[in-house]
Amino acid sequence: MCSRFELDAKTSKIKQRFDVSGELTRPHNTETKPTDMAVVIEPSRVVRLLSWGFPATWDAKPLYNARAETLSEKPSFQPFLEHRCIVPATLFLEWRKDGKSSYRNRIFLTDQDQPAFMGFAGLMSDTHFTIITCAANQIMAPVHGRMPVILSRSAETAWLDPGVTFNNAARLLKPYEGNDLCVMEDAVDPPPQGELFL
């Protein structure tokens, strides 16, 4: 996944879709990039605003993506394996490289030709969160080799359940299996400077 996603929906719709209780405070911008504040849903179904990307002492760039395959091996993420969250989104952006050109793609789930909510699997601390990525599915693969873990509705419940250990929850970290993933390519657009394709 690249370093952009959006949450463009009414607050009431977000609360209804993710069964959120209490107040839902949102950032002013719909597009989110690393270090921005974003809506995160914690296991109690309460919304928090956290900064996107765990700080890294060895790098100026935050750890905004975490590979599903190596989560339990990385000291940076091991302390947070039981601190799981869902990151709601309506789309994410990825840039496809073709020689010296880059093409921006908007990726989203469709519901009767309208964008639908996605719930990304994430890990959180008291102040920051990261989005977990996995290998791309067949729809996403022509654009990029990785994608965020998009949880099904039932998987969202299991992912947030504090009674489910990470070792059991890890089976949920797989490429999206639905056929409602849509990729729309825009005109040539350079990717954000200085950011990694993870």
Image (cartoon, grey):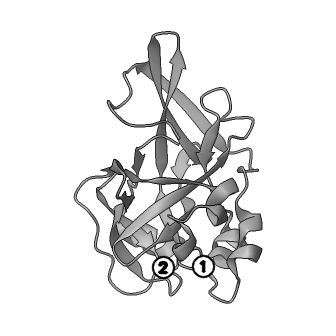
Rendered residue at 53%/65% (across/down): 122
Rendered residue at 71%/84% (across/down): 164
Rendered residue at 42%/70% (across/down): 40
Query: Are the residues flagged by discs 1 and 2 in contact, CB closer than 8 Å?
Result: yes
Give x and y (percent) for residue 189.
37, 21
**Picture disc at residue 160:** 1
Inter-mark Cα distance, 1 to 2: 7 Å
Which quadrant would residue 70 be assigned to in this image?
bottom right
- 168 or 13: nearer the viewer: 168
- Disc 1 marks a residue whose amino acid type is Leu
Which quadrant would residue 48 be assigned to in this image?
bottom left
Which class describes the residues within 10 Å of circle 1: few (<14), some (14-19), or many (20+)? many
- Disc 2 marks a residue whose amino acid type is Glu
Whether residue 128 sits left or right of residue 83 in the image: it is left
Looking at the image, the residue that sits furthest to the left is 28
Rendered residue at 45%/19% (across/down): 102
Provide the residue designation for mark 2. Answer: 42
Q: 112 above or below 81?
A: above
Give x and y (percent) for residue 62.
37, 53
**Picture disc at residue 66:** none
